[in-house]
Image (tube, grey):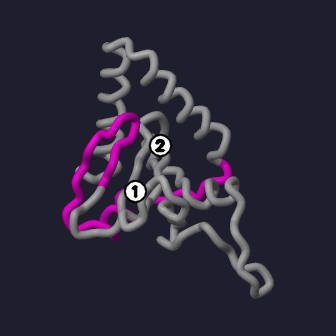
Amino acid sequence: MGAKSLYLDNREKYKEQIRLANDIKAQEALNRGYERYKKYKLLWETLDLDEIVNKLFSNPIYTNIGQKYVITDPNSKYIIYCDNSASYFRIGNKEIPNDQKGHYLGSNLESVLNETINGKIHGTSKDKRESLSHFKMKINKKG
């Protein structure tokens, strides 16, 4: 089973667990994540989670941490955070604490903190960093 299938299966189980537990805070967090997805998905690049996981990890480990489905590998500097509310994810650099700017990466696996315009380096705005570091998950629709 590929990373995408594992994520989708886990997401449904997580949502059902939240529903059965009547966990209002967790449900509100899921709703916020889904609203973020609906609002910004047109700005986000679409990537194939299976391809990314195969590229970054030789021995992926899958874990639920709160609302996130986390994929990592002890032999890799990368970490992937999949949102359990909707089909999107971010890629992080484990060498930079996740509460610091520069932790989240673009699709080229580089920091999205700065950009070069007319040969000069400029800091990117928060909105631009967010759009460059969130990815819609490529989902193959059947039928």
Residue 22's label in the rendered image is none
Query: Mark 2 is on which residue type?
Result: Ser
| Residue 2 placement (x, y as % from top left) | 27, 53
- Residue at coordinates 41% horizontally, 47% vertically from top-left? 82
- Residue at coordinates 69% horizontally, 53% vertically from top-left? 127
Q: Which residues are magenta?
A: 42-71
- Residue at coordinates 54% horizontally, 66% vertically from top-left? 106
Q: Is 43 placed above or below 111 here?
A: above
Q: Is 28 placed above or below 1 here?
A: above
In this view of the protein, which residue sits in the foreground, 18 or 9?
A: 18
Q: Count residues near mark 2 (Cα–Cα under 10 Å), then give few for <14, some for 14-19, many for 20+.
A: many
| Residue 108 placement (x, y as % from top left) | 51, 73
Relative horizontal placement of residue 62, taking residue 53 as reference (left or right): left
Query: Mark 1 is on which residue type?
Result: Leu
Residue, disc 1: 49
Quadrant in which the C terminus appears: top left
Q: Earlier in the sequence, mark 1 or mark 2?
A: 1
Quick check: is 57 in the magenta stretch? yes
Separation of marks 1 and 2 at Cα, in angstroms: 10 Å
Q: Quadrant of residue 66?
A: top left
In this view of the protein, which residue sits in the foreground, 26 or 51?
A: 26
Q: Looking at the image, which residue sits at the far left?
A: 59
Q: Looking at the image, which residue sits at the far bottom?
A: 119
Residue 87's label in the rendered image is 2
Q: Looking at the image, which residue sits at the far right?
A: 118
- Residue at coordinates 53% horizontally, 35% vertically from top-left? 33
| Residue 142 placement (x, y as % from top left) | 43, 43
Relative horizontal placement of residue 3, taking residue 32 as reference (left or right): left
Q: What secondary structure is found at the residue carrying circle 2? A: loop
Q: What secondary structure is found at the residue carrying circle 1? A: helix
